[in-house]
């Protein structure tokens, strides 16, 4: 009877050792996968940061262009251009009267 008990205990011990070895292997695999996932996540965060900066710069540039092309600016520029045209016309008339 003691031999049966001893064999049973040895078998159980071998099963526990085998289960522990499998568990260690699986834990290493999970740690490796976690490491790879962390690297991928860091790369994605870096790409996201770069995209955020690019988007911000593009938005600023677009705002500048929008202000340059605003109706108020276009109206002011048209008035200035009309004033310059009148000045040129006036100068041309004076030059013609001098000749």
Image (spheres, rainbow, N blue to C red):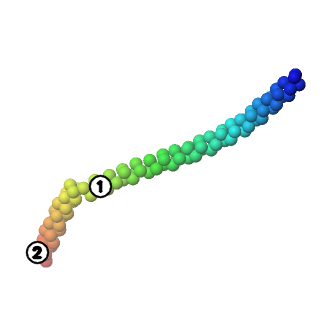
* 27 versus 90 height, above or below: above
Residue at image location 79% in from the left, 29% down from the top: 12
Q: Position of residue 5 (x, y in %)?
A: 84, 24
Query: Can the viewer see residue 67?
Result: yes
Q: CA distance from mark 1 to mark 2?
A: 44 Å
Camera-nearest residue between 38 and 90: 38
Classify residue 20 by image quadrant.
top right
Q: Please name the residue shown 48% across and 46% down the image.
A: 49
Q: Secondary structure at mark 1?
A: helix
The tag earlier along the polypeptide, 1 or 2, is 1
Q: Is residue 73 above or below residue 49?
A: below
| Side (left or right) of 44 relative to 10 | left
Q: Nearer the viewer, residue 2 or 25?
A: 2
Disc number placed over residue 66 in the picture, else none? 1
**Residue sticking out furthest to the front:** 1
Residue in the picture at 82% in, 26% down = 9
Q: Which residue is mark 2?
A: 97
Q: Residue furthest right?
A: 3
Residue at 68% x, 41% y is 29
- Disc 1 versus disc 2: nearer the observer: 1
Between residue 34 and residue 66, name the one nearer to us.
34
Q: Are marks 1 and 2 in contact (CB under 8 Å)?
A: no
How many labels, in total?
2
Most extreme residue toward the left, as rendered? 97
Assign a secondary structure to mark 2. Answer: helix
Residue sitting nearer the eye, 26 or 65: 26
Rendered-image quadrant of the C terminus: bottom left
Residue 80 makes an appearance in the image = no
Residue 25 point in image, percent of width and height: 72, 38
């Amino acid at each position: 009877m003691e031999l049966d008990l001893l064999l049973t205990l040895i078998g159980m011990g071998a099963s526990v050792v085998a289960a522990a070895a499998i568990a260690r292997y699986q834990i290493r695999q999970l740690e490796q996968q976690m490491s790879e996932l962390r690297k991928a996540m860091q790369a994605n965060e870096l790409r996201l940061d770069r995209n955020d900066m690019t988007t911000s710069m593009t938005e600023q540039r677009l705002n500048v262009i929008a202000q340059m092309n605003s109706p108020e600016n276009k109206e002011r520029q048209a008035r200035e251009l009309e004033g310059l045209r009148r000045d040129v016309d006036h100068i041309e008339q004076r030059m013609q009267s001098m000749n």
